[in-house]
Image (cartoon, rainbow, N blue to C red):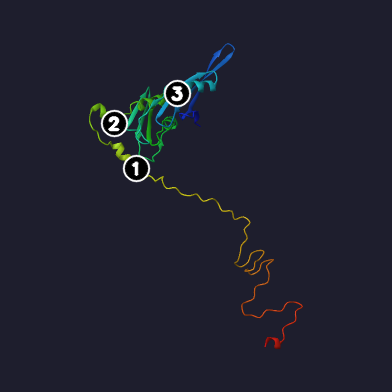
């Protein structure tokens, strides 16, 4: 889980690995811990650090301090890297390939943590050789330091390079991305608990328009039919009816 170091600059850190080493002395064993930490602001800046101490929290704190001092700025094109690059350190090699919007980060845990802290959300990766975390991290940063933007290369060559292939693919990928400008109102759940049914064929308690349930009343008489006299009332005579 990323840890927020500075809210004003949006710097976060994540711990990749904690190593334990021991040495045997006369009185027993002494343990020391080493922490590998990645620090970034998810806006193009990222760094790594490795710290050692006799306790884990102190080792992580040292690594975070070193990582913040070693942060580098990475050139980006949208949400991906400008071009394909391959970094190498010792026996580890990491290849970074730009991807169109919506692809996501296809990488392992070590490379994914670095790219996410840098703010890259669309990238394809492949690791060759050793997969040691410390060597893989250094190989990724070796590749990230080789990235160049087309504008910088054009200024060095004093030529107009135009639009690169990666930029063309990114523009094509944006056409298939869903638009985020449409705002839809969310409807909350409707509470129907306790509501009684009205009308129909009558429920458990019946109703004026129902057919009578367990407690339902008498059915209503049809229109135009003679009504029965109430109890105790004298029926009307024929003379009064005429």
Q: Quadrant of the C terminus?
A: bottom right
- Front-most of 189 and 22? 189
Instruction: Report whether 39 appears left or right of 233.
Output: left
The numbered disc on residue 68 is 3
Mark 3, Cα crowd under 10 Å, few <14 / some 14-19 / many 20+, is: many
Give the mark nearest the N terminus, 2 or 3. Answer: 3
The numbered disc on residue 173 is 1
- Front-most of 63 and 135? 63
Task: Give the residue at x 50% y 19%.
Answer: 52
Task: Give the residue at x 55% y 20%.
Answer: 55
- Figure check: 28 above or below 102: above
Secondary structure under tag 2 reads: helix
Secondary structure under tag 3 reads: helix
Residue position for label 2: 151
Task: Give the residue at x 26% y 28%.
Answer: 155
Q: Position of residue 97 (x, y in %)?
A: 34, 34
Give the mark nearest the N terminus, 3 or 1. Answer: 3
Q: Measure how far apart labels 2 and 1 are at the Cα level.
A: 22 Å
Nearer to us of marks 2 and 1 is 2
- Figure check: 56 above or below 151: above
Instruction: Please identify the residue farthest to the left as the structure is shown.
Output: 159
């Amino acid at each position: 889980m990323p840890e927020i170091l500075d809210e004003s600059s949006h710097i976060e850190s994540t711990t990749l690995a904690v190593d334990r080493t021991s040495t045997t002395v006369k009185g027993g064993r002494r343990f020391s811990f080493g922490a590998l930490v990645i620090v970034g602001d998810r806006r193009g800046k990222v760094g790594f650090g490795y710290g050692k101490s006799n306790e884990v929290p102190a080792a992580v704190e040292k690594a975070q301090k070193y990582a913040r001092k070693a942060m580098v700025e990475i050139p980006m094109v949208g949400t991906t890297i400008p071009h394909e690059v391959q970094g190498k350190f010792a026996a580890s090699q990491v290849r970074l390939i730009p991807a169109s919007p919506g692809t996501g980060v296809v990488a392992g845990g070590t490379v994914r943590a670095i790219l996410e802290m840098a703010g890259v959300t669309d990238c394809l990766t492949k690791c060759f050789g050793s997969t040691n975390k410390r060597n893989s991290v250094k190989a990724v940063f070796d590749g990230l330091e080789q990235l160049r933007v087309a504008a910088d290369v054009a200024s060095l060559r004093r030529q107009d390079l135009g639009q690169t292939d990666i930029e063309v693919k990114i523009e094509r990928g944006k056409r298939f991305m869903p638009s985020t400008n449409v705002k839809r109102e969310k409807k909350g759940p409707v509470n129907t608990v306790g509501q009684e049914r009205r009308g129909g064929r009558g429920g458990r308690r019946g109703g004026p328009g129902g057919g009578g349930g367990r407690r339902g009343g008498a059915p209503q008489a049809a229109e135009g039919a003679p009504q029965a006299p109430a109890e105790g009332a004298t029926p009307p005579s024929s003379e009064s009816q005429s």
